[in-house]
Amino acid sequence: MERNVVAHHSGEVSHHELKQSLGTWQLWGIAVGLVISGEYFGWSYGWATAGTMGFAVTALIVAAMYTTFIFSFTELTTSIPHAGGPFAYAHHAFGPLGGYLAGVATLIEFVFAPPAIALAIGAYLNVQFPTLVPRHVAVGAYVVFMMLNIVGVQIAASFELLVTILAILELLVFMAVVSRGFSIAHFVKGGWAGRNHFSAHALPGIFAAIPFAIWFFLAIEGVAMAAEEAKNPKRSISIAYITGILTLVILAAGVMLFAGAAGDWTKLANINDPLPRAMRYVVGSASSGWLHMLVWLGLFGLVASFHGIILGYSRQIFALARADYLPNYLAKVHPRFQTPSRAILAGGVVGIVAIYSDELITFGGHTLTANIVTMSVFGAILMYIISMLALFRLRRTAPFLERPFRAPLFPYFPAFALLCALVCMGSMVYNNTSVALVFVGLLLVGYIYFYLTSRQREAAPFDVLIESEEVTEIAPPAHQTSHGQ
């Protein structure tokens, strides 16, 4: 038999500073919990631009993009279980520059999402206690949940699973309560950007609403950043991802439909607490016990995402710093809890500054929260594009990479996800020019640091973190084709 020299890459991390303790259910809790605040707020801004029917079209396309993306992304995560997530995949596929772009895009996504969620926590509590200042509450949330993340990943993940389950139950309760006033006539009235029937007038709004449809699913890919802390990442991550995206698609459809059918949906757009307002149409005044319950329990959804994304951004900062893409100071773990405490605090400082940066972040005719959401989405979309390109390249350049999970319907699923992501990026740049310029500015600032520290990375190459590709003489399996299918 003829022997060929091929590159084989195990994808394993060669040393572990982080504690491996997460099971499948905890990873599912992280997958859903990272995102579930998107069912509570943020998405309703899409109604302001596209109407309920127009936004439903946007959400359907985005849901298809995320479903195909996650089925494809899971191949990368299980093949290369690394705390850097997309940063590691792009580095393997495209080298240091690719790793930089994916890493900084993911960092922008995960650092800018928490301040928007923290402000929503403040808005929800302000409904119950009007004297509370939402921004002060947001800062308090940062302090509490940064400390919880520092104490230990096992405690943090168990807490995440608990609040995620409670958040899902609360969304089901919301749907049950508002179903008493359900009327499809409410949902469709003026649902095409202010008109009752579809016309070309609705198309600009459908495209402009893309960032808010993405908010329904944004950050589910953050499970990849917990890969080094999973007990059995090659099996548990795929289960967590697939069940997680299916859970979120069902919840997103239910929340959007029931909230829009409860009453005048135009009064729910451009606010941070659409669900309590929607429930008020059905249960009456603010003194209703149902409304109080929704405000209090609705906080579980916001807390689940806020807490989970802190876990995500800290692992991304940790991984980038460990590979000298950020100051190595941020790669140090807590000596007792084995958590990246410095990375947790660093991301928190950026988030708190964003909360108080009205003059810098309120522009283009959008609110502070809307612009923060859009900035986070820009980072996510760029990362999705790079990740799908990395999947295609690794299929070609590393055909014998161990792949515990293979993207179904390859290359159609990743190609569809890539095409949708490119369309989303083009639409977002067109409709959010000011935020796009700030996003590009952040990429350039990061690139300056990347360029100035290139020699430092050459002295400590990336493959000290992940086992390097080992060239071995093996015979390719008879059933495996040259393109790795």
Image: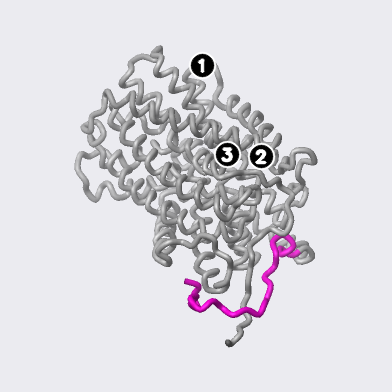
Label 1 sits on residue: 129
Residue type (three-letter) at the residue carrying disc 3: Gly
Give the distance between the C-alpha atoms of the residues marked 1 and 2, in whole angstroms: 32 Å
Residues shaded magenta = 461-485
Secondary structure, mark 2, is helix
Which residue is at 51% across, 32% downward?
Answer: 302
Position above or below: 29 against 318: above
Query: Can you name the residue that lies furthest to the bottom here?
Result: 2
Give the distance between the C-alpha atoms of the residues marked 2 and 3, in whole angstroms: 11 Å
Q: Is residue 44 left or right of residue 374?
A: left
Which residue is at 71% across, 42% downward?
Answer: 339
Give the distance between the C-alpha atoms of the residues marked 3 and 1, in whole angstroms: 26 Å
Secondary structure, mark 3, is helix
Quadrant in the picture for residue 79: bottom right
**Marks 1 & 2, CB-CB < 8 Å contact:** no
The x, y position of residue 161, in whole percent, is 55, 35
The x, y position of residue 441, in whole percent, is 59, 53
Q: Counting other residues with Cα less than 10 Å from the Cα at mark 2, is it few (<14), some (14-19), or many (20 or more)?
A: many
The x, y position of residue 231, in whole percent, is 63, 48
Which residue is at 47% across, 27% downward?
Answer: 298
Q: Which disc number belongs to residue 153?
A: 2
Q: Earlier in the sequence, mark 3 or mark 1?
A: 1
* Quarter occupied by the N terminus: bottom right
Residue type (three-letter) at the residue carrying disc 2: Val
Q: Is residue 221 left or right of residue 321?
A: left
Which one is nearer the viewer's eye here, 382 or 429? 382
Label 3 sits on residue: 308
